[in-house]
Amino acid sequence: MSTIAADARLATRASSRARSSERLRRYLRNLGTLVLSAVIVVWTLVPIYNMVLISLEPEGDVFTDHIWPRVPSVESFWGVLTQGHWYLEHFWRQFANSLYIGLMVTFFALLFGTLTSFAIGRMRIRHGWLVSNAALLTYVIPASFLAIPFYRIMQNYGLANNPWSVIAALVAFATPYAIFVFQEYGRSIPIEVDESARIDGASPPQIYLRIYLPLMAPALVAVGTYALLLAWNEYLYQFLLLSSKSSMTVPVALAQFLSSDQSPWNYMMATAIIYAAPPVAIYYAFRGRMTAGLTMGGVKG
Amino acid sequence: MSSTQQVLAVEHGALNRPRRRRWHRHLHGSESAWAIAFVVPYAAVFFAFVVYPVAYGLWMAREPSLYGDLIANPRYAQTVINTALYVGLGVNVKMFLALLLSGFFMRRRWWIKALLPIFILPWALPAIPAFVSFHWMLIGEEGLVDSVLSALFGIHGPLWFNDRRLALGSNIVAYIWKWMPFWTLTFFAARTAIPQEIYEAADVDGASGCRRFAHVILPLLGNLYLVCTLLSTLWTVGEFTTVSLVSEGAPAYSTDVLATLGFHYAFDAAQPSLGVAAVLSALPVLIPITLILMRTLQTRDVQL
């Protein structure tokens, strides 16, 4: 009788010890997760904090070493928006150039991408697979390797300092991805839809405009965002092909700030933040849809 | 954003083979004319702005003597070493950390869920502002990093761009900072696609922590990891933006990579053929990687 009681006591003590060591382990794991989270936050935010910090400095006070703004001032943002510094006298023109290039790249990538994927995926053109595989090859050519010949070619075409040279290059890089996504997405639309329209006497352009494009709307949104952000992020071709103050885009102007010793750094960082805001906003606005697309792409087999 | 989709799309769209059902027999004369008309715009873009520049570049760099000039130049040898370090360290550290972090983000804690939108910020941010900020952060005593070092620990930080190793390291860190979130999301998407039962089965069999990583995650994600690493290597060998903005090749052009060196030759030294040759000298590395990539995509099912 007493041994049973002793056994039971031992068992409870052992289990409570196990429970407390389990609790300790969970506590340590939580602590580790928290520390790692803190490291990730610092790692991610330091360069961004640096941008904000410098942009908030009043002019002429940039070379003092401190780690938070003593007298925060939004003067620099105001200066950028009103083009209040000679470095910034073309800011809105350059912003408009960036926007124009982005919108044109989006439009043509969507147009050429849908036309091609319609012909390959819906009309099943002969040797269509050859076209999509050739497009895939564009992926594996690093864009910077084409830059020097591209520059020469654009000089020969007489397109130097013309936004269309940048648009042409970026459309060539964005369209292969567009073709892929449209073909993948198009597989979910039954081909019978097209067939019945054909039987009713619709011509291929009518099917493309009235049936294909409306059904592809979600993919159009995703690829359109991709192309717009690609153009907004691109630097090398814009730097190479656009050199005059009125034809250049914001990234090129930003890099010019960097190459001068006398630059107003607070204005530079304010410009950087203003330029970075639209894509970040777009990204967070479409985040839900993109994550859904991601998992869809991952699961599909 | 959709660059992740891009990677995943490449994978499962992988090399469309000829279809078994040949519908084109049903295309009538006018319809097949339309189909060709629909393909022509992209074909024109492809030939004018991809094929033609490639051919033109190969033609520009056709003289064997150019390569002799390159090899004779000590700056070129240093650039090759820099590129190898930059790509080798940058890509591999980034991919491995991304693989580990994707597992971290799978945990169900509210603060980890809240962390993800912050973590992907570098990716949402355009590259130019980010790298300009990196450059200015490391500029020296006035930079944020050295200010923090002196404010918190009272030490004088180094002049980051006066030392080749530090400058090269700065480039690599900036590169990892910018691109790690993207690959983390790619692996995260792949991990969420692993059925929960597999984790549970592993749990029942007593595999957790490192053993689960080695015996469950790696076999399932191994192919994806390989494909992503190869793709990322291809894209990084030609990377221009990071080095041209973060260290600007400093000190004294000793941290240049092939893309920036080619650019200097072509535009600062007015030797475009030499520039193209410098960049094309990476082909012996790029072509095998492309072939391995194609083969991996073709023969193996990268899908989960």
Image (spheres, helix red, strand yellow):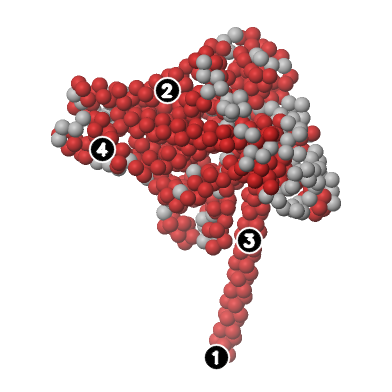
Of B243 and A20, nearer the camera is B243
Residue B37 can be seen, yes or no: yes
Q: Is residue A168 above or below residue B61?
A: below
Of A278 and A207, nearer the camera is A278
Rendered residue at 69%/47% (across/down) = A75
Label 2 resides on the chain identified as B
Residue type (three-letter) at the residue carrying disc 4: Arg
Of A142 and A220, nearer the camera is A220
Identify the image quadrant of residue A146.
top right
Of B24 and A115, nearer the camera is A115
Disc 3 from disc 2: Cα separation? 51 Å
Please state the horizontal and vertical placement of residue A225, each as a whole percent of the image.
45, 41
Residue A34 — which label? 3
Q: Kindly identify which residue carries mark 1.
A: A1
The residue sitting at the left extreme is A200
Disc 3 from disc 1: Cα separation? 49 Å
Disc on the earlier residue, 3 or 1: 1
Q: Kindly identify which residue carries mark 4.
A: A210
Disc on the earlier residue, 1 or 4: 1
Residue type (three-letter) at the residue carrying disc 2: Val
Disc 4 from disc 3: Cα separation? 53 Å
Instruction: Mark 2 vs mark 4: give the one in front.
Output: 4
Rendered residue at 61%/33% (across/down) = A90
Q: Kindly identify which residue carries mark 2.
A: B45
